Image (cartoon, rainbow, N blue to C red):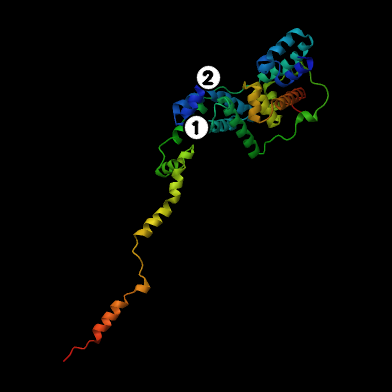
Amino acid sequence: MTDDVEAVLVEQVRLGDQRAFAEILAAHLGPVNRYVYRMTANTTEAEDITQEVFLRLWTQAGRFDPQKSKLSTWLHNIAHNLCVDHFRKNGRMVSGDPAEETGGDEPEASLIAMIEAEDIKAAVMQLPERQRSALLMCHYQGLSNKEVAEILDISVSALESLLARARRTLKTLLANGGSP
Amino acid sequence: MNLKQFSDLLAAYGAEETRWPAEIRDEAIRYRREQPEAIELVHDAQALDAALQRYEAKDDVSRLQSRILRQVQESSAEPDIVDRIWNWLVPERAALGTLWRPALVATLPLLIGVVLGGSLPEPADPLNDSWDDEIYLLALGEEEPQQ
């Protein structure tokens, strides 16, 4: 779906067109849900948050400005903010940065290659929220560095520092079996 | 591009070139091809990329999709009279041209008061009270019939 087509569909949603909404939902529900799931590591919470993302699309379609961003960027922005709100409400903000507590050489690539999926999931959940969100959006969601920087409201160079820290932390966590 | 820049690129984005920023992608691909020291850096980054790829997320969202559509349908049911009045009064996108609606409603009590006040009879003016009538009636009482 091109950006122009999406802009037209969102305008139709704003006017209450449920068919246009269903079309957008079909295109974007999967990616948004996958991002939220990896942020929360909980299926039920992810579905509730994802539902809220699209209900906001339904009720606040007028706020989308196709001149400023793509629809996927806008939806991920809402999803990111809802995830952060969710963590704050539930006292699940990750304090500190595990990477800053570690030192020494980087772990060997061969060790990391043998890590199981559950260990990766656990390691990702140990990342501070901004690092996690940055990594997920860049690595899994296919958003560009500029789009992710816009969502996080930081510069591209700040984003790259965030990403580098996230990857460094993950390597350490995975090599040490989940502890920093 | 030099080794440090290439290393920083991999540190942030990993080894997969499709994730590299568009503006430096071609240059980085050339560097990777031409510089032997790039190979080990790529190898290290690829290991973490492969590990991350094993973190799968559910793909079947059909149930969630139905739930969201149902919610939207329910919320789109015909609004009751109060909601309709409110939505007319304050549209979702209140442009300047629609501000007359809440302004009109705000001035309605004033207008009603002015109309009501204008339709009420004038109150009696004590200064112009009917002393004339009193005097006339008194005068009638003083006239004794002549016998």
Q: Circle 1 — which element? A: helix
Mark 2 chain: A
Question: Closer to the camera, A114 or A155?
Answer: A155
Instruction: Write down the quadrant of residue A94 in the picture.
Output: top right
Classify A123 as above or below B119. above
Residue B144 can be seen in this image? yes
Image quadrant in which you'd find residue B46: top right
Disc on res. A93: none
Please report whichever mark, 1 or 2, sits nearer to the chain's N-terminal start.
2
Q: x, y (%) of residue B77? A: 42, 36
Pick whichever, B33 or B136, lies toward us. Answer: B136
Q: Residue at x 66, y 19 (%)?
A: B53
Which residue corresponds to the image point at 48% horizontal and 33% vertical from the top-left?
B71
Q: Assign a secondary structure to mark 2.
A: loop
Viewport quadrant of the N terminus of chain B? top right
Q: Which amino acid does label 2 sit on?
A: Thr
Which amino acid, mark 1?
Trp
Mark 1 burial class by Cα count in 10 Å: few <14, some 14-19, many 20+: many
In the rendered image, which residue does mark 1 sit on? A58
Q: Please name the residue shown 21% across and 88% down the image.
A: B144
Report the Cα–Cα distance between label 1 and label 2: 20 Å
The answer to whether one can see residue B55 in this image is no
- Neighbours of disc 2 within 10 Å: few (<14), some (14-19), many (20+): few
The chain containing the residue under callout 1 comes to A
Is there CB contact under 8 Å for labels 1 and 2?
Answer: no
Q: Nearer the viewer, residue A53 or A33?
A: A53
- Residue at horizontal 76 percent and vertical 18 percent from the top: B5
- Residue B110 lies, in percent from the top left, at 43, 54
* Rendered-image quadrant of the C terminus of chain B: bottom left
Q: Name the one closer to the observer, A175 or A169.
A: A169
Q: Name the residue under label 2.
A: A2
User: What number of labels is visible?
Assistant: 2
